């Protein structure tokens, strides 16, 4: 019976453990260096997607924190109804995001139409439901 081979990277000296630190700083650096590779930095669509994600998050968090106050102070809702009204926005976004992928995968046609049609239908359905549930 032979002893199992030890991989070169599995052998660790005390100095390597000290350099790595307790939280695995080198692993974090390796991950970030792959995520920010030079190939990705040269693609303009990455910057557009990052900017769009920033503004989407900005609007979502602005509505999440501001909408209950607006409903309470300006529209005169009681506190529980104001919070419910604001949470429906987040819940609808989650359900819509999770359901739109499988729906668009089942449709035929060019890629842009497969993604736009379910998005438009869910947008209209959300507007109607918001008007009915939270008048």
Image: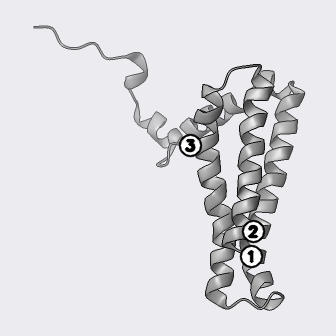
Q: Which disc, if any, is residue 25?
A: 3
Q: Which disc, if any, is residue 131?
A: 2
* Cβ atoms at labels 2 and 3 below 8 Å apart: no
- 16 on left or right of 90: left
Circle 3: element type: helix
**Nearer to us: label 2 or label 3:** 2
Q: Residue at x 67, y 91 (%)?
A: 78
**The N terminus is located in which quarter?**
top left
- 38 on left or right of 85: right
Q: Residue at x 74, y 65 (%)?
A: 61
Circle 2: element type: helix
Q: Nearer the viewer, residue 3 or 54?
A: 54
How far apart marks 3 and 1 lie (CA) works out to 51 Å
Q: Is residue 113 above or below residue 28?
A: above
* Cβ atoms at labels 2 and 1 below 8 Å apart: yes
Residue farthest along the left direction in this orientation:
1
Q: Is residue 19 above or below residue 134?
A: above
How far apart marks 2 and 1 lie (CA) works out to 5 Å
The residue that disc 1 covers is 135
> Pointer 1: residues within 10 angstroms few (<14), some, or many (20+)?
few
Q: Is residue 111 above or below residue 128?
A: above
User: How did the renderer colour the structure?
Assistant: one colour
């Amino acid at each position: 019976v032979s002893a199992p081979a030890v991989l070169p990277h599995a052998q660790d000296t005390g100095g390597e453990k000290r350099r790595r630190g307790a939280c695995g700083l080198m692993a974090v650096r390796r991950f970030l260096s792959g995520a920010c590779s030079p190939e990705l930095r040269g693609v303009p669509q990455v910057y557009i997607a990052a900017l769009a994600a920033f503004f989407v998050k900005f609007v979502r968090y602005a509505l999440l924190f501001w909408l209950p106050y607006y409903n309470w102070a300006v529209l005169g809702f009681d506190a529980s109804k104001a919070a419910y009204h604001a949470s429906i926005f987040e819940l609808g976004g989650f359900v819509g995001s999770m359901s739109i992928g499988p729906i668009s995968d089942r449709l035929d046609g060019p890629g842009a139409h497969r993604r736009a049609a379910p998005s438009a239908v869910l947008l209209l359905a959300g507007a109607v439901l918001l008007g009915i549930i939270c008048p």
